[in-house]
Amino acid sequence: MLLQQQGLIKLKDGLTTYEATPKDIADNPKKLKFVEADSATLPRSLPDLEGAIINTNLVLEAKIDPKSALFREDSKSPYANVIVVRKGDETRDEVKKLDAALTTPEVKKFIEDKYGVAVVPAF
């Protein structure tokens, strides 16, 4: 989905963001070649690749400067972390308090200060 949002490929219609694979590419005008690999190997393999899509946690662990990315997901990413509870628990006071506490301007500032461009608050 990220590559489609950047205009590099077009995926087949009707896919959810979680089920797309290289076989689902409908249009690849730049003739990019895709090799699926274990995500943990990508930071070590990057010198041997023309590019890679690497999860932020792996970028940070590998001490790669996130500003060196050609593009990054934004706050509208379908992969943003969210608070999830069992059905029926969403009305519990402690869940409401946790949600309120984790989505404050102070938490947003903490995320931005600690992680810079690497992590984007999606709230």
Image (cartoon, rainbow, N blue to C red):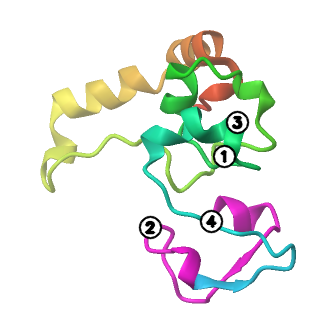
Determine contact: label 2, label 1, CB under 8 Å.
no
Q: Residue 99, percent across and down? A: 34, 31
Q: Residue 98, percent across and down? A: 28, 25
- Residue 1 is tagged as 4
Please name the amino acid that badge 4 sits on: Met
| Label 3, label 1: how far apart the Cα atoms are | 22 Å
The span shown in magenta is 1-23
Q: How many marks?
A: 4
Chain-order first, disc 3 or disc 4: 4
Kind of element beneath mark 3: helix
Callout 3 environment at 10 Å: few (<14), some (14 to 19), or many (20+)? few
Nearer the observer, 41 or 86: 41
| Label 3, label 4: how far apart the Cα atoms are | 24 Å
Kind of element beneath mark 4: loop
Please name the amino acid that badge 1 sits on: Glu
Callout 2 environment at 10 Å: few (<14), some (14 to 19), or many (20+)? few
Q: Residue 64, percent across and down? A: 65, 23
- Residue 47 is tagged as 3
**Which residue in the protein does label 2 denote?**
18
Q: Residue at x 67, y 59 (%)?
A: 2
- Residue 73 is tagged as 1
